Image (spheres, helix red, strand yellow):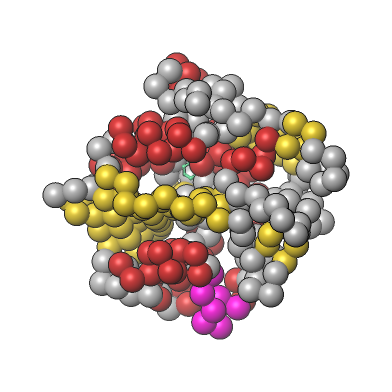
Amino acid sequence: MRSNLDTSSLKYSMKESRQYYDAIQKMWDEFAKVNYQSEVYQTKEFLKGKTSLNSIELDELGKFVKGKSLLHLQCHFGLDTLSWARQGAKVTGVDISGKAINLARQLAKNAKIEATFVESNIYDLPKNLDEKYDIVFTSYGVLCWLNDLKRWAEIIAQFLKLGGIFYIAEFHRFIWVFDWDDPNDFVLKNNYFHDPEPIGYTVSGSFADGNKTTEKLDGYEWSHSLSDVINSIISAGLQIKFFNEFSKAPFQRFPFLKKSVDGYWRYDHSEIQLPLVFTLMAKKEE
Ligand SMILES: C[S@@+](CC[C@H](N)C(=O)[O-])C[C@H]1O[C@@H](n2cnc3c(N)ncnc32)[C@H](O)[C@@H]1O
C-alpha cells in the first residue's frame, strides 16, 4: 500500500499552507453561525439536556472521562465539548474559528457548564496553550482540514499526560474517492491518498445548511489515507489500543445514505456495506 506520510506531507510547509488556513477559517466562521441555528446540530435540544455525542464514541470513550481533563481539538461551537463536560470531564475546546469559539463560550454560559475555549489553529496550539491533559478527543469532519498529520499527531502527544489517551472518531476517507451524484453509477473522483496540494472548491453553505445561505466561500481539503493516520500516531510515540471501522455514520454526509431506526445513516444495500466511520484509541504509555 502506498503511504505518503514521511514524504509529501512534509514537503508542504506550514508557511505555504497559511493562505489555505485563512480561507478555511473564514469558511468555518460563516458555517459556525449557520450550523448553530441548524436542525442538524440540534443546539436547542442540547440546551434542554440532550447529548450531542453518539453511541460510537460514548461506548468506546465514555467510561474513561469522568473526573478527567479533556482537550477537544477542532471543537466547532462546543456541543461535543460541553456534552463531555456533562459526562464529568473538565473540558477545554480548541478551534481555528473565532466565531465558533465565541458561540461555544455563549453556549457554555447558557447551558451553565464550566468550560475553557481557545481560538487557535491546531498547529499554533503549542504557542497558545500550556497544559497537559488526560484525554485528547477529536471527531467527525476534522482531518480533511489539516495538511500535515505527522505534526498533528506530535501536537496530540505533546498535550497528553503520561498515561493519557487519544481518541478519534472520524468519517472514513474511502467514500470520498467516488462521485456520489448518482449512487448507481460509481464514478471515480478523488485520490484516496494524500496529495500535498489540497482539493479546492467553492461553497455557499455547510453540509448542515440545506439552503446554502452563506456568501460564496473558498474551501480546501486534504485527503489522508488510513495508513497515514495510523502511522502518524505511531511516529508520535503513542501506542494504539484499538482501531475500528463502522458501516454507519451519525450524519448524512452523502445524499445516498439512508437513516436507520437507530438514528445512524447507512448505505442502503442488501449485501454490501461501505466503511463510513473509523475510530482509534491510542495511549501515551508511562
Ligand atoms: C466539522 S467541524 C468539527 C467537527 C465536530 N464534530 C462538529 O461537527 O461540530 C470542523 C472544525 O474544524 C475547525 N478547524 C479546521 N481547521 C482547523 C485547524 N487547523 N485548527 C483548529 N481548528 C480547525 C473548523 O473551524 C471547524 O469548527
For residue 253, say whether it is visible.
no
Q: Splitting the image into 4 quarters, where does residue 113 fall?
A: bottom left
Q: Residue furthest left?
A: 286
Residue 70, image x, y percentages? 32, 60
Q: Residue furthest front?
A: 271
Number of numbered markers: 0
Residue 93, image x, y percentages? 41, 57
SS majority, magenta: loop
For residue 272, say whether it is visible.
yes
Left/right placement of residue 197 relative to residue 15 reads: right
> Is residue 46 covered in magenta?
yes
Q: Is residue 62 above or below residue 144?
A: below
Camera-side residue of 53 and 126: 53
Camera-side residue of 91 and 269: 269
Residue at 78% x, 43% y is: 180
The stretch of residues the image draws in magenta is: 45-52
Residue at 64% x, 66% y is: 264
Residue 48, image x, y percentages? 56, 83
Q: Splitting the image into 4 quarters, where does residue 266 fall?
A: bottom right
Residue 125, image x, y percentages? 35, 41
Left/right placement of residue 228 relative to residue 202 reads: left
Q: Is residue 189 above or below residue 185?
A: above
Residue at 61% x, 59% y is: 248
Camera-side residue of 201 and 178: 178
> Is residue 192 covered in magenta?
no
Residue at 75% x, 59% y is: 270
Q: Splitting the image into 4 quarters, where does residue 27 fall?
A: top right
